[in-house]
Amino acid sequence: MYKYIISICLLFVCAIGYSQKKENSQTKKDSITYKTGYGLRLGVDISRPVLAIVDKSYSGLELVGDYRISKKWYIATELGYEEEKTFEDFTTSTSKGSFIRLGANFNAYQNWLDMNNEIYIGMRYGFALFDHTLNSYKTNVGTPYFPSNTAQTPLTETGLTAHWTEFQLGIKVETFKNLFLSAGFSYKIMLSLDDQKNFKTLYAPGFNRVFESNTGFGFNYTISYLIPFVNK
């Protein structure tokens, strides 16, 4: 009789021990924390060289970078150089200079496990320092019998500046470990723009074409690499 009681007790203890071990194992599985890299991400806008090949009146280079400060927020910047030749009905002009944009991105995408992708919304302050040249102009007073002449004497003004703000929307996808491809669109609002004497600036580096409404649009397609400092 005692043997049966002892056997039952031993089985009961073993069952409890196995159950606790299973629960602990399940708890460990459920408590796995997936970490992603926090660090400096640097890259280049590869759409600029492509545009320079397609459009011979354009040349430019844009470098991009961001630094992750929290799970959702990034400090971001873009800087570069552009030269654009603009053709109008009666004028030809060239803008060339450097620019920088500073701001932040918010990642609205909820990543799964250890994914590190983004659907981001961003805002920037932009500044450009550039030269503007009126290459040629033609007076709009010609007739079929006396056509107007084109003046070819270049007129250049240096040290012009532009200030603007822009809203950005885009995606970043980690294609390989720490390697990202990104595509983005921006809507720009000009705050302040210097004009060449007696001639309106038609293009500002970093802002693109300046319309009468003082607004503009832009896009980029970048490839970048993350240098992780820590995983969180």
Image (tube, grey):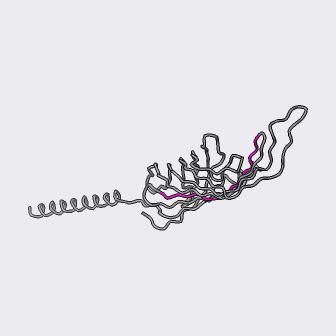
Residue lying furthest left: 1
> Horizontal and vertical percent for residue 173?
54, 53
> Horizontal and vertical percent for residue 230?
45, 67
Residue 202 appears in the rendering: no
* 156 magenta-colored: no
In the rendered image, the vertical position of residue 221 relative to residue 141, given as above or below: below
Q: Is residue 154 left or right of residue 219?
A: right
Residue 228 appears in the rendering: yes
Q: Nearer the viewer, residue 160 or 182?
A: 160
Q: Main secondary structure of the magenta part?
A: strand
Q: Nearer the viewer, residue 127 or 228?
A: 127
Q: Nearer the viewer, residue 4 or 53?
A: 53
Q: Nearer the viewer, residue 224 or 141?
A: 141
> Horizontal and vertical percent for residue 86?
74, 46
Q: Which residues are magenta?
A: 74-88
Q: Is residue 131 left or right of residue 40?
A: right
Specify the quadrant that holds the C terminus. Answer: bottom left
Residue occupying image coordinates x 86% and y 38%:
148
Specify the quadrant that holds the N terminus. Answer: bottom left
Residue occupying image coordinates x 38% and y 60%:
33
Residue lying furthest top: 144
Residue lying furthest front: 198
Q: Is residue 2 left or right of residue 141?
A: left
Q: How many marks?
A: 0
In the rendered image, the vertical position of residue 110 relative to residue 38, given as above or below: above
Residue occupying image coordinates x 85% and y 35%:
142
> Horizontal and vertical percent for residue 203?
68, 48
Residue occupying image coordinates x 27% and y 62%:
21
Residue 81: image quadrant is bottom right
Residue lying furthest bottom: 229
